[in-house]
Image (cartoon, coloured by chain):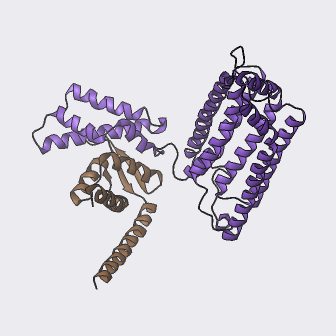
Chain colours: A brown, B purple
Amino acid sequence: MTEEILAGHLQELRRGTVVVACLSLLQSPQYGYSLLETLNKAGVEVDTNTLYPLLRRLEKQGLLTSEWNTEDVRPRKFYAVSEDGKQVLDVLLAEWRTLDKTLNSIAQGDKQ
Amino acid sequence: MTSSTAQTLSERYIAEVARRLPEAQRADIAEELRGTIADTVEGRIAEGGISPETAEREVLNELGDPTVLAMKYRDKPAHLIGPEYFPSYVALLRALVPVVPTIVGVVVIISALINDSPVWSAVGQGIGAAAQVVFHIFFWVTLVFAFYERKAGRAPKGLVDEWTPDKLPNHVKATRVGLGEFIWSLVGIAMIALFLLWQKDHSYLLNADGNSVALFHPDLWHGWIIAIYLTLAAFVVVEIAKYRTGHWTYSLAWANGVANAAFVAVLAGLTLTHRLVNPAFIATIETEINQPDVTNLVTWAAANFWVLIGIIVVINCAQAFLKAREAELTYG
């Protein structure tokens, strides 16, 4: 198995988790750069050039709201999860837990 | 903060992204990007020991090609034709590319010959026209599909069909007639077509003046050649249909029979009006080669020509029906 294959599968597995992490973290409003820092510190790997377009897309879908804050050192766009976004987050988290349970029982079933 | 050169670098980057965005989003995204770059650069400098210029360069490098970033913001496909349309795209090209250029090429060759162009010039014109048609087909089909790829949810009916189990063929398809067999059949037909043109000026038989003597009657070039090429085209159509179906069927065998009948009809017409073999050809053999053996062989071949043609035509038709029956028994 080459490293490229492994990297490809890992990336595919992580793809949807960035959305869940963003919706979770944005229950308290943050601007892009601080969200990126929080995500990276928490171990969620995401690039700047992926996160910002993602935030725009979630906002367009109505899952996030945004507001410019001009009181800081420089103008910053703060994002927060909307009501719709919270509902989506609940469903996604429930799905995540189900997947975790399912995959665990499959993996343990293999060992027995 | 950042030096003036570093500022121009990031401003140039932001401008490169912004000008590729829809106007409604342009200012907003540019402003956010400006803040992000500044925040990230400050973070890098605070982390330790690099100059503002290096930090800025690093950050822009990580953001990557502005074209790509703009594309991510626009959320438009970064491919010409995606997986949804690709099968229809290929299917349409496969239907058009073998047929249309061939027809155009043949028509151009025939009309050039009717206008008394030299043979090789006519062939050249035909190939040139066919090649142009190939380019046009690729260009316009690709353009239309790339357009629909970008008009999500507006696929016209027929461009992309919903697949249902009803679309399955009503029998298990045979292993396809091989591509090699298909190509050889086409090469064979093409060789007959080219031989007819070639023999006009390049027969090895030379008369007393040193000019080559055509095997077939000169009247061939007054209309008859069109009939001959049309029957050859009919054989090409049968071959294409057979290759696409993957095996002989009864309808294909009948079509093949019709093509053979047309071929025989044209030859019969030529024979009955004494327009098949060039009389000068036999005369030249008698006078120039002047060997009784050769003359006898040629006259024998001319006399028994119909027997030979008859055998070939019967074998060809019978084979098609036998293979169609075999295919029907195997695959229902």
Image point (63%, 59%), residue name: B162
Rendered image quadrant of residue B44? top left
Rendered image quadrant of residue B301? top right
Tell me if I can see residue B98 in this picture.
no
Image point (80%, 48%), residue name: B310
Outermost residue on the bottom side: it is A112
User: From the viewer's perspective, is residue B267 above or below residue B91?
Assistant: above
Outermost residue on the front side: it is B292
Q: Nearer the viewer, residue A77 or A4?
A: A4
Q: Where is residue B107 in the image (x, y as percent from the top left)?
A: 74, 31
Left or right? Give the position of B81 relative to B98: left
Image point (69%, 58%), residue name: B248
Rendered image quadrant of residue B203? top right
Image point (85%, 30%), residue name: B275
Q: Where is residue A47 in the image (x, y as percent from the top left)?
A: 29, 49
Q: Which of B278 and B332 is in front in this view?
A: B278
Q: Nearer the viewer, residue B72 or B6?
A: B72
Left or right? Give the position of A90 relative to B305: left
Q: Position of residue A78 (x, y in %)?
A: 34, 49
Tell me if I can see residue B254 in this picture.
yes
User: From the viewer's perspective, is residue B324 above or below residue B40?
Assistant: below
Q: Where is residue B94 in the image (x, y as percent from the top left)?
A: 61, 46
Q: Which of A26 and B204 is in front in this view?
A: B204
The quarter of the image holding the N terminus of chain B is: top left
